[in-house]
Amino acid sequence: MARFSGSEWTGNIRMNSASRSLLWLALLTVVVCGEFALASPRPQDSTKPAAVKEEPFYLHAKHVSELGLDCNACHVPVKDGSVSLKRPGHDQCMACHQDAFDKVNDQKICSQCHTAFPPTSDQQLYAFPRFKKQRPILIDFSHAKHVDPHQRIDPKTGMRADCSFCHITNAKGEYAIGHEQCASCHSKAGMKPSMSASSTTQDCQGCHNPQGIENPSLRKTAVLVEVVSGTYKNIRFSHTVHFEHRGQFDMNCTNCHRDIAQATSLAMISLPKMDSCGTCHSQQASNRRMDNCGTCHASSETGAALASYSRWIKPAFHDENFRQRHQAQASASGAQCYICHTGVSATSTAEQRCEQCHRTMRPASHTVRWRDDVHGKFAALDRDKCTTCHVADTCVRCHNQTPRSHQPLAYFKGGAHANLAMLNERSCFTCHTFENTCAECHTKTN
């Protein structure tokens, strides 16, 4: 741009002062607007594609809900006629995605199963479902609907028949349970959901909901409930070893898995806690006691064993008041009294737990003077408490006999009873009534 001095402007362009003022204002506006334009962002180039946020791909919702495929289109039996299904492989995928395998690998398809792209090994597979924490519930199952209310024992195994029917262990003591066990009943006519080698999506959805696992919006609950993994870390445990000694300790599945019989969902089930082990292992049994940590813990443990892990040491909460006020703790659901008190069963109800102790152990209030002096007053205040141990005829067995205070009877009836009656008339009416006793003499007119 050519530069002009002030004299050149005035020499070449004849303007009055008003016109020059307007010109300078216009030039100033151009300069300011130009600087603003340089500072402002340029409009986006329409030729450059904008970044598109990729929506999550829900494998089962796409194939079942959207495309209407049946489960057996991808999940095929391991062999003809079997109810056990194998994980879908390339053969099942190629039924629809032939081009993705013949021409060029499609990363979107491969990444649904393979952890690497391009995949180089059949070991590079995701576990289903892809969930970062513990495994989610894959099946809707209620133990409460399947357990035997009579708790019958299988003579072959010595265990509860309803447990050993489905839960079968291998040589390592690991449980193997699958469609074969379910099909023992659900393959019969009339059983729902029905299970066979030709089961359809409707049958599968009687137990499974993979769409809800993948897509949170399809879950019955807002939070995905998880099942505790099958083992504790660094713990040595074998079901097989415990089954070998089941007769010695009258052991059964519910000794440790106490919440199974009432569980209506797998979400209610958790692994047994350490205090359950105390049912047997708190005894002084060689190197299998609870205070020998190395028996079960594979990791190195240091320090003294907790006092609560031995039945030979009284727990800290068993203070002077506990004997009088232990009722709430002893009758609470899941009370652990049986760990130390051998007369209490682990599977007993709250009422049974009380009876198992109090039928053999006299309450602290029952002192030497209890029978002769004070039991009547306590019974009058709360007879229901007496019935915890005593039956209805307990009182009658004693009070049908003439009390020692009535001896000699002729002297007592002749007038000696008056002082006792005036002091505590209510005690008289434990056996007597005014009409059948007092009225015989005290209503006669002279």
Image: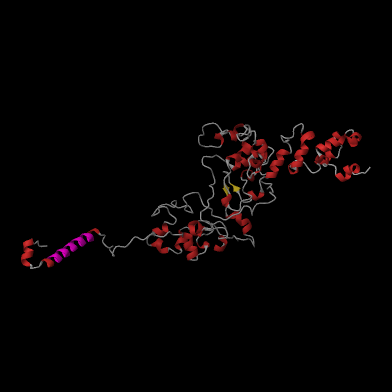
Question: Is there any visible trace of residue 200 in the rendered image?
Answer: no
Q: Is residue 277 magenta?
A: no
Residue 39 % position (x, y): 24, 58
Q: Is residue 9 above or below residue 351?
A: below
Name the residue: 56% across, 51% down.
267
Q: Which residues are magenta?
A: 20-37
> Magenta span: helix, strand or loop, mainly?
helix
Left or right position of 440 against 109: right
Residue 5 % position (x, y): 7, 61
Residue 332, picture quadrant: top right
Name the residue: 90% across, 37% down.
413
Q: Is residue 112 above or below residue 440?
A: below
Name the residue: 14% across, 63% down.
24
Left or right position of 65 against 34: right
Residue 226 % position (x, y): 53, 51
Q: Nearer the viewer, residue 58 or 411?
A: 411
Quadrant location, the N terminus: bottom left
* Residue located farthest toward the front when viewing the structure as drawn: 446
Q: What colour scheme governs how the chains and residues are painted in the rendered image of this protein?
A: secondary structure
* Residue located farthest toward the right when viewing the structure as drawn: 446
Residue 260 % position (x, y): 62, 49
Quadrant location, the C terminus: top right
Q: Nearer the viewer, residue 348 or 423?
A: 423
How many marks can you see?
A: 0
Q: Is residue 32 magenta?
A: yes
Question: Is there any visible trace of residue 60 in the rendered image?
Answer: yes
Residue 287, picture quadrant: top right
